[in-house]
Image (cartoon, helix red, strand yellow):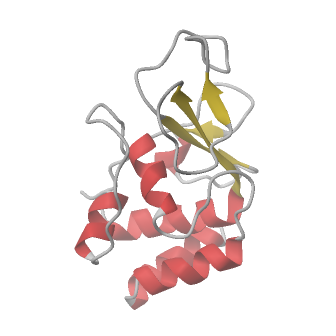
Amino acid sequence: MTTLSNELYLRGISYNSLLTNRANDILFSDVLELCEVLGYIARNVSHIDGEYPQGIAVPRDWNMPITDNITSGGHEMKWGRQYRVYLGSVVNCPPIIRQRLHNDQHNRFGGSRFVEALLACGFTPGYGNNANIVMQTLVRIFTSTNEQNALTQGFNL
């Protein structure tokens, strides 16, 4: 079992997490399953957004501040930051991501610790993700032939 943040750490890539220990992550059976998902997300990401409580410093251009103790969806204040990935398509979506999709029409999933780690490997907040640039970064991180094949397989799903 592994996580994206663990794989980045093992490869010498570090970043300062802004999340508390309550943040959710996505646990993958192995690095090849992770790479397939990363390739799929690289091709299908629509945008990445985050909600954060008012008064917390935000180092990136997150587009959904929570103000007046109410979230953008009209719910009570969250305890901390929450990040989500929105997919433009969920056709052939890997099962580990499909099971995490919110029950709405937005094709989105959470796992803030996973989403935060995505930012350390080429993804950007908002709508500015370029699939080819993200894949170029991913193949520099995941260098074995099997990992790169899994990235390509996920990209082509």
Residue at image coords 41%, 64%: 33
- For the residue pair 78 and 56, the one nearer the viewer reads as 56
| Residue 12, horizontal then vertical, whole percent | 27, 77
Image quarter for residue 117? Answer: bottom left
- For the residue pair 143 and 134, the one nearer the viewer reads as 134
Residue at image coords 69%, 25%: 104
| Residue 125, horizontal then vertical, whole percent | 63, 53
- For the residue pair 55 and 123, the one nearer the viewer reads as 55
Label tally: 0
| Residue 39, horizontal then vertical, whole percent | 57, 69
Image quarter for residue 7? Answer: bottom left
User: Would residue 5 appear left or right of 86 to someone viewing this image?
Assistant: left
- For the residue pair 90 and 75, the one nearer the viewer reads as 75
Q: Where 148 falls versus 48 (above or below)?
A: below
| Residue 58, horizontal then vertical, whole percent | 52, 42
Q: Where 113 falls versus 72 (above or below)?
A: below
Q: Where 44 falls versus 89 (above or below)?
A: below
Image quarter for residue 153? Answer: bottom right
Residue at image coords 27%, 59%: 2
**Is the N terminus in the top left, top right, bottom left or bottom right quadrant?**
bottom left
Residue at image coords 54%, 80%: 137
**Is the C terminus in the top left, top right, bottom left or bottom right quadrant?**
bottom right
User: Would residue 148 appear left or right of 21 to someone viewing this image?
Assistant: right
Q: Where 4 falls versus 51 (above or below)?
A: below
